[in-house]
Image: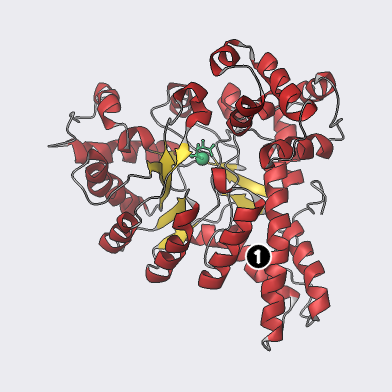
Amino acid sequence: MSATSVKSAGRRDGSSSVRRLKPKQIAAEVQDILASTQVIDIHTHLFSPAFGKLGLWGIDELLTYHYLEAEFFRSSDIAPEEYWRLSKTERADAIWKALFLENSPISESTRGIIAVLSAFGLPTDASGLHEARRFFHAQSIERYMRRVFQMAGVSSVVMTNDPLDPDERAVWMNGGQRYPEFHAALRLDRILCGWPSHWQQLASEGYAVDERASGKSAGEVRRFLADWHKRMGPLYMAVSLPDSFQFPDDSITSKVLSEAVLPSCCEFGLPMSLMIGVRRQVNPKLRLAGDAVGKADLRALENLCHTFPDNRFLVSVLSRENQHELAVYARKFKNLLPFGCWWFLNNPSIVEEITKERIELLGTSFIPQHSDARVLEQVIYKWHNTRRTLAPILTNAYQLLHADGAEITRQKIQRDVNRLFRANFEEWTRRRAR
Ligand code: RAT
Ligand code: ZN
């Protein structure tokens, strides 16, 4: 499968054949089905064209992705302070020189740049970025966005929408966005993890909340969420939590989560997405690239699933050490749906390990991946890599099943891939996404 080999939509149901497959035929069928099944990318940081400059695309944005910046500081003499003084194009030039000309781009993030350039027929070893810049500047976003999604085999993506972000807010207050390829997700980090520095923003907007989130605050946060639910029409509410997250405890996070956010999720029939395990700003000089990972205590998750059986939780954990526990908890709690291999886990060796573990413990009742893309074209390489990693894993699963005596058909494989790429999410959000 090349990075541009994703086939167009239209064979989602695989209605063509009920032919029993021989073991040797399984690999080709799996590859074909993975290539032709459109994915719903359930967590990204992309924005629809309605958000203007918030939507990132093109070579300079791709090269200055924080995953690459972290690698850049290891291979360059330029110190962070100096780097941040450079313009965006100067930063991209510096990264191209350090990671692509002076070194081989063999890391996952750098290889992704090569895959994107190559998907558009652009030079992958040029001494400068002129040709690439010319190509990306010539694109007009609406048509280009659809072309990129088509190349990536993605039918729609879920954004990350922060109601307290002033730039985003302006768009939502002026009617929001109407691109069917983009869904909203109501992201609540500032409210759940940054209450001391954000409660006043809610207060200034007319919600009667206080510093301790006491008294009327929970009810008022619910009123705030109801207003934003109406404005955004989100598919889920979401928060990214530190490795130190505990539930229950006497923190404002626990209080607002249990008294406001989870009841509101129930009221609106929305799942709650929890991404657990980030250690924010271990090295603040690196800015967005300065976060790290820590092993979390997943008893907090057990307590949540147990205490709120009517809530549905979509959960991703950042530490490799937490993956097995997450899959085991999913066996215990039907209201828990594991998803994705994010950030430092999104490397083929780790994705392979986690996905095999999930298949062995959960069958097809999980969501294998999301892209976490921040720059539009990243969906091309991230979804290509996901399909490439999944192909041998699924092939092996069906070959084992065949060896154990089952009949394998294209139809069954299609049904399963459909579930992994789309249907589990649609069921969880009770919405048929594009
Ligand atoms: O993967 C990332 O880009 C991180 O910086 C985080 O944004 C993470 O994905 C999150 O959503 O918290
Ligand atoms: Zn993210």
Q: How many marks?
A: 1
Q: Quadrant of residue 28?
A: bottom right
The spot of residue 338 in percent (x, y) is 48, 58
Q: Mark 1 — residue?
A: 417
> Left or right: where does residue 322 sit relative to residue 254?
right
> Left or right: where does residue 253 sit relative to residue 393?
left
154 or 361, nearer to the observer:
361
> Left or right: where does residue 114 sit relative to residue 53?
right
Q: Amino acid at mark 1?
A: Val
- The colour mode here is secondary structure
The spot of residue 286 in percent (x, y) is 51, 24
Please say if 83 is above or below 268: above
Please say if 397 is above or below 389: below
* Residue at figure coordinates x 62%, y 11% from the top left: 86
Please say if 156 is above or below 425: above
Ligand 2 within 8 A of label 1's CB? Answer: no
Please say if 13 is above or below 315: below
* Residue at figure coordinates x 48%, y 21% from the top left: 285
Q: Residues within 10 Å of mark 1 (few under 14, many from 20)?
A: many
Q: Quadrant of the N terminus?
A: bottom right
* Residue at figure coordinates x 69%, y 57% from the top left: 389
Question: Could one spot residue 153 in this view of the protein?
Answer: no
200 or 300, nearer to the observer:
300
Q: Quadrant of residue 309?
A: bottom left
Question: Could one spot residue 2 in this view of the protein?
Answer: yes
The spot of residue 392 in percent (x, y) is 72, 65
> Left or right: where does residue 164 sit relative to residue 307?
right
In the displayed orientation, state which residue is furthest to the left.
215
